[in-house]
Amino acid sequence: MILAVTGGKGGVGKSTVSVELGAALDATVVDADVGMADLPIDPGPDLHDVLAGRADPIEAVRGGGPVRLLPCGRSLAGARAADVTALAETLRDVEAAYGDVVVDCPAGMRADAGVPLAVADACVVVASPQSYALADAVRARELARELDAGLVAVVINRAVDDPPEHAFEDVLGAPAVAVPADPRMGETLDSFRPVVRSAPATRAARAIDEVADAVRKIERV
């Protein structure tokens, strides 16, 4: 299964949720934000190299850590050389080799945001807990719908007090899961230690597990 993690705007914690879901689902995470990559990278081939035809996607996947990862380069030259139309085949190759794939999509409504959604079997929309974020989530859902990526759940990330879960559910027609603000999740990308592995009993980890369970139910259908 290929699961796209998307959102109507940047800065909502989409990359963090992608890594957490990758850990919860034992999936391979692909950083598909060719122009503004956010996930950790170390020396070796990356998605820029794969999309430019310089590397094999299977060889570019990093294993051995808490989450398998196909990172993306961060150079402007690499982004320019990348053929985004090759992303669909790349994701299918990774799925065939490793199983489930979680794709950290480009933020917002940029043109390249639609490429991973077009190949995904389903998607999760990440939004901030403010009520005005609902409009951004609706735009993300509409793009996913146009590209036939069914909405599994909405993640209301960094929630405090009483997040508007019912409003999101009523408008988007999918379960809304509030992931409470937790400083440990704020360190997920820097430390690459997902809370679902390092602190599984926390409310944030349990919320991520709830989203992962919703994804598993889709897989069983």
Image (cartoon, helix red, strand yellow):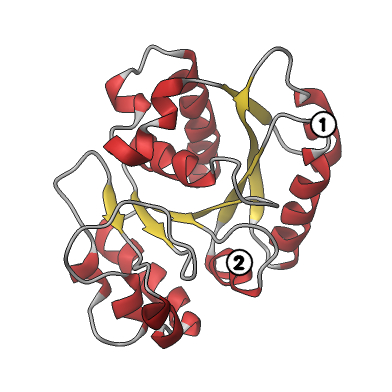
Residue ID at (43%, 28%): 185
Percent coordinates x, y for residue 81 in the rendering: 40, 87
Q: Residues within 10 Å of mark 1 (few under 14, many from 20)?
A: few
Percent coordinates x, y for residue 170 in the rendering: 85, 33
Percent coordinates x, y for residue 130 in the rendering: 76, 30
Name the side, left or right, on which 98 lies relative to 132.
left
In the rendered image, the residue lying farthest to the left is 64
Q: Which residue is mark 1?
A: 131
- Specify the label residue 177 is tagged with: none
Can residue 1 be seen from the camera position used here? no
Q: Give the secondary structure at mark 2.
A: helix
Residue 38's place in the image compared with 48, above or below, is above
| Nearest to N terminus: mark 1 or mark 2 | 2
Can residue 173 be seen from the camera position used here? yes
Q: Which residue is mark 2?
A: 113
Q: Give the secondary structure at mark 1.
A: loop
Q: Closer to the observer: label 1 or label 2?
A: 1
Residue ID at (32%, 39%): 190
Name the side, left or right, on which 188 lies relative to 57.
right
